Image (tube, rainbow, N blue to C red):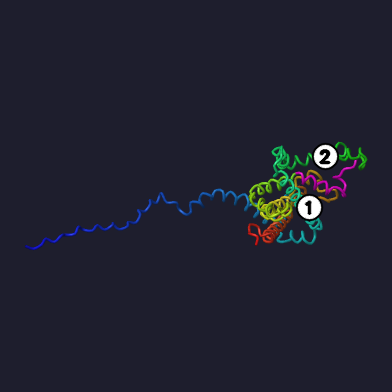
Amino acid sequence: MAQDTAVAPPVRRPPPDRKPARRRAGTTTPRRLPYLLIAPAGLLMLGFIAYPVASVFYYSLQHYNPTKPWRNGFAGFDNYVKAFTEDPDFWRTLTFSFQWVFAEVTLQLLFGLALALIVNQTFIGRGVARAMVFSPWAVSGVLTSTIWLLLYNSQTGLTRYLADMGMGEHGTSWLSDTATVFPAVVVAELWRGVPFFAILILADLQSIPKDLYEAAEVDGAGRFQQFFHITLPHLKDAIILATLLRAVWEFNNVDLLYTLTGGGPAGETTTLPLRIAGIAVDSHDFGYASALTTVAFVILLFCSIVYLRLSKFGGEDK
C-alpha cells in the first residue's frame, strides 16, 4: 500500500503594497495659495509705495507749478541740472544734512547704549527707570518741539535762569544765535532719539546667554573685556539696524527743525528735506521739488546698500 504523501499548506504571501489613494483635489493645498493670501497686502503696498515713487519721478521730469500753468510741460533733466549746477543751496543743505545725521546718530548710539547697559542691571526701581528712559520715544515730534521751545524761551526758559546765575545775558536765545543753534537742536533731537537705541539694544542684551559671562569671569576676564568680546559682538546686528533706521529718519527729519527754527537763523539748520518742503509748499514748484526728492532717495538708497555691505549685516564674524 502506497504511503500517503503529506500535502504542505499553501503559503500565504503578503499582499502587494498598494499606492495610497489620491487625495481629493479639494483637500490638497495648491502651491499658489500662500501667494494668493498675501496678494491683497502686496497690492496695497504696491499702491501706497510704488505709485507715489513713480509719480515723484514723473513730476521730476516736468515743469509743474500750479500757480504758473503756462510754464508747465516736459522738462527732461533740466531740474536735475539746475540742482547740481545752478542751485548753491542744494549743496549747502545736503552738506548740513550729512552733518546733522552724523552728529545725531553717533550721539544717540552712545547715549542709547549707555542707558541700555544701565537699565539692564538689577536694582530697585528698575521698572520706573525703564519707563522714564523710554517715555520720550512715545512723544510726537511737534510736542517735543513745543517742550524744547519752552525750555529755550529767552524769557521763561533755561537761558533766563542761567543769566540769573551769571552765566550768559538776559534776553538771549540759543535758537536765534548761529553759534548755539546747532547744539541746541541736536540736544532736543537727542532727547527724542536716544530711547529708540536704548529699546533695541536692551532687547538684544537680554538675549545674551549668562553662561558666557560666567565662563569669562572664571577665565579672569574683566568688565571691559567682557564688553568688547561678548556684549558688542552680540549687539552687532542690532546696532547696525538701529543706526541705519535712525540715519534715514534723521536725514528726512522735518517736523522738529521746522518747528524749532524753521531752517534758520540764516538757513543754518536747513536740511535738504526741509528745503524740499519749502520749495513745494511755499514756491509751489513741484517739478523741482520732485527732482530734489528723487536725488535724496537715490542718495539714501546708495548709502544704505554700501553701509549694509561694509558692515556685513546678518553675517557671521570670522
Q: Secondary structure at mark 1?
A: helix
Q: Secondary structure at mark 2?
A: helix
Q: Which residue is mark 2?
A: 151
Q: Quadrant of the C terminus?
A: bottom right
Q: Which corner quadrant of the image does residue 174 belong to?
A: top right
Q: Position of residue 107 (x, y in %)?
A: 77, 50
Q: Quadrant of the N terminus?
A: bottom left
Residue 264 magenta-highlighted: no
* Residues drawn in magenta: 171-191
The amino acid type of the residue labelled 1 equals: Ala
Inter-mark Cα distance, 1 to 2:
21 Å
- Label 2 crowd (10 A; few <14 / some 14-19 / many >=20): some
Q: Residue at x 16, y 59 (%)?
A: 7
Q: Considering depth in this image, is 215 or 49 the residue closer to the camera?
A: 215
Residue 108 to residue 9: above or below: above
Residue 181 magenta-highlighted: yes
Q: Earlier in the sequence, mark 1 or mark 2?
A: 1
In the image, which disc is placed on residue 175? none
Is there a contact, CB below 8 Å, between mark 1 and mark 2? no
Name of the residue lying farthest toward the top: 156
Q: Position of residue 202 (x, y in %)?
A: 68, 46
- Label 1 crowd (10 A; few <14 / some 14-19 / many >=20): some
Q: Which residue is mark 1?
A: 103
Residue 123 appears in the picture as rendered: yes
Q: Considering depth in this image, is 267 or 213 the residue closer to the camera?
A: 213
The amino acid type of the residue labelled 2 equals: Leu
Residue 64 appears in the picture as rendered: no
Q: Position of residue 298 (x, y in %)?
A: 70, 58
Q: Considering depth in this image, is 150 or 39 the residue closer to the camera?
A: 150
Q: Residue at x 73, y 53 (%)?
A: 222
Residue 161 to residue 230: above or below: above
